Image (cartoon, helix red, strand yellow):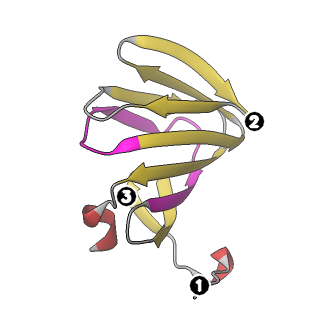
Amino acid sequence: MSNVFHLNDIDRKEIIPGFQARFVHTDSMTLSYWDVDKGAVLPLHKHIHEQVTQVEDGEFELTIAGKTRVYTKGMVAVIPSMTEHGGVALTDCKIFDIFSPVREDYKAL
């Protein structure tokens, strides 16, 4: 059995200032569709989840394990579990994240 979602039917939630997301949760992962405001800062942090991040639009400066790079449309970053990362939106951005395992903290929102 499959589930079909339309992103426009999912309410956006502001997780930190300037970062609004729509979430889809499965048994083993969380998909996050982010609208990020220019200048919004993602503080350095780490978590148990493996994370795959794709910039769908805009420019996002992402630091992973102390290495900083500007990501643009079509670029993908793989962030291993417990690896410190953070960044700043250089422009308005659309970002797609996949987390495994499920982000129970986001699921609870």
Mark 1 highlights which residue?
Answer: 3
Mark 3 highlights which residue?
Answer: 15
Q: Residue furthest bottom?
A: 1
Helix, strand or loop for the magenta stretch, by majority: strand
- Which SS class for mark 1? loop
Q: Is residue 60 above or below residue 9?
A: above
Which quadrant does the C terminus fall into? Answer: bottom left
Q: Is residue 25 above or below residue 78?
A: below
What label does residue 43 carry, if any? none
Identified by mark 2, the residue type is Lys
34 horizontally vs 47: left or right: right
Mark 2 highlights which residue?
Answer: 73
- Which SS class for mark 3? strand
Tell me if mark 3 has few (under 14), some (14-19) or many (20+) residues whose alpha carbon lies within 10 angstroms of its own.
few
Work out whether residue 109 can be spotted. Answer: no
Q: Which is nearer the eye, 52 or 18?
A: 52
On the image, the x and y values in percent for residue 16 come to 36, 52
Give the quarter of the image for residue 44.
top left
On the image, the x and y values in percent for residue 106 come to 33, 65
40 horizontally vs 50: left or right: right
On the image, the x and y values in percent for residue 86 come to 39, 29
Q: Is residue 25 above or below residue 49?
A: below
Residue drawn at the location 65% of the way across and 74% of the way down: 7
Q: Which is nearer the eye, 19 or 1?
A: 1
**From which residue to which does the magenta span run?**
30-50
Identified by mark 1, the residue type is Asn
Identified by mark 3, the residue type is Ile
Is 60 a magenta residue? no
What is the CA distance from the residue labelled 3 to the residue labelled 1?
Answer: 25 Å
89 horizontally vs 65: left or right: right
Tell me the mark number nearer the camera, choosing from 1 and 2: 1
